[in-house]
């Protein structure tokens, strides 16, 4: 019995949108359609992005880094 299941190829792996029914192991054929352009998330800050005499330093980036909020009850510790 043939089943067609949609998925995405990402970083060398195929991620299926759903689990195939009644199949625990089977040969598969993967067909690649026209690739969609993937937009890369840009960084909010990059070294030297602001013009002027005072540029960002490594310490500025460490200060701006989010390390969790201990009071939000999400267990960041």
Image (spheres, grey):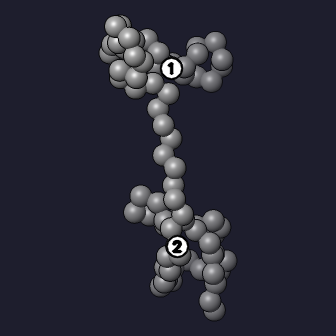
Above/below status of 31 relative to 2: above
| Closer to us: 33 or 7 | 33
Residue positioned 53% across, 75% down in the render: 33
Binning the other alpha carbons within 10 Å of mark 1 as few (below 14), some (14 to 19) or many (20 upward) gives few
Residue 25 percent location from the top left of the image: 51, 79
Asked if one can make out residue 62 in the rendered structure from this viewpoint, the answer is no
Residue 31: x and y, percent? 50, 80
Give me the disc on residue 66.
Answer: 1
Identify which residue is drawn at 32% across, 15% down. 58
41 horizontally vs 19: left or right: left
Q: Is residue 62 above or below residue 44?
A: above
Residue furthest front as drawn: 52
Residue visible at 54% across and 19% down in the picture: 68
Check disc 2 and report the residue beneath it: 34
- The image quadrant of residue 61 is top left
Report the front residue among 5 and 56: 56
């Amino acid at each position: 019995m043939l089943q067609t299941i949609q998925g995405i190829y990402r970083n060398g792996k195929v991620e299926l949108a759903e689990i195939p029914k009644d199949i625990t192991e089977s040969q598969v054929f993967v067909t690649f359609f026209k690739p969609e352009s993937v937009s890369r998330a840009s960084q909010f800050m990059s070294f030297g992005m602001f013009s002027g005499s005072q540029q960002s330093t490594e310490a500025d980036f460490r200060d701006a880094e989010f390390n969790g909020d201990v009071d939000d009850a999400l267990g960041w510790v």
